[in-house]
Amino acid sequence: MLNISGIKEGVVLDHIQAGKSMEIYKYLGLGKMDCTVAIIKNARSSKMGRKDIIKIEGPLDSLDLDVLGYIDHTITVNIIRDERIVEKRCLSLPDRLVNVIHCKNPRCITSVEQELPHIFYLADKEKEVYRCQYCDEKHS
């Protein structure tokens, strides 16, 4: 049994689809943050078979849960204080994403106006389809 010590204060991202932890690490910008990060890949899970877990220790005011909801809304977010889980958050697909994904349409205003934020809205919740706010291009 692999043992990774508990954390005093921070977040544990659990039930990550096996192999997705590095993508989440990148999207959340954890490499640029001043915090301790432990990534556990391919952990055994009775519910999922295999899963990844990310433990992040430190103050996490800048953690973007919308990004997590977009990547995988089945992830469980455990908020840790004084080495105990004080809150469990379930994610959902965000209604809006800002500067997470980028419009690929060469005729979109975001291609010309570089400083414009890339804003996408959730167009179809069942099919998990996002569209550009400016040109309505579907993100694939």
Image (cartoon, grey):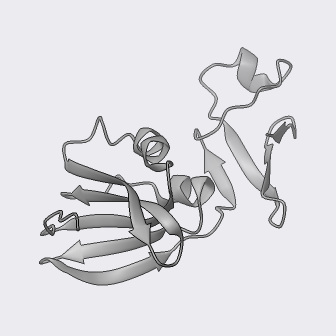
- Image coordinates of residue 133 in percent, x first then y, are 79, 43
* Picture quarter with the N terminus: bottom left
Q: Is residue 114 visible?
A: yes
Compared with 1, 38 (above or below) is: above
At horizontal 43% and vertical 38% (from top left) the residue drawn is: 26
In the picture, residue 7 is in which quadrant? bottom left
* Picture quarter with the C terminus: top right
Q: Nearer the viewer, residue 90 or 111?
A: 90
Label count reads 0
In-image side of 104 versus 11 (left or right): right
In-image side of 106 versus 2 (left or right): right
Q: Nearer the viewer, residue 66 or 8?
A: 8
Q: Is residue 60 visible?
A: no
In-image side of 102 versus 128 (left or right): left
- Image coordinates of residue 14 in percent, x first then y, are 41, 67
At horizontal 57% and vertical 61% (from top left) the residue drawn is: 69
- Image coordinates of residue 120 in percent, x first then y, are 72, 46
At horizontal 18% and vertical 76% (from top left) the residue drawn is: 81
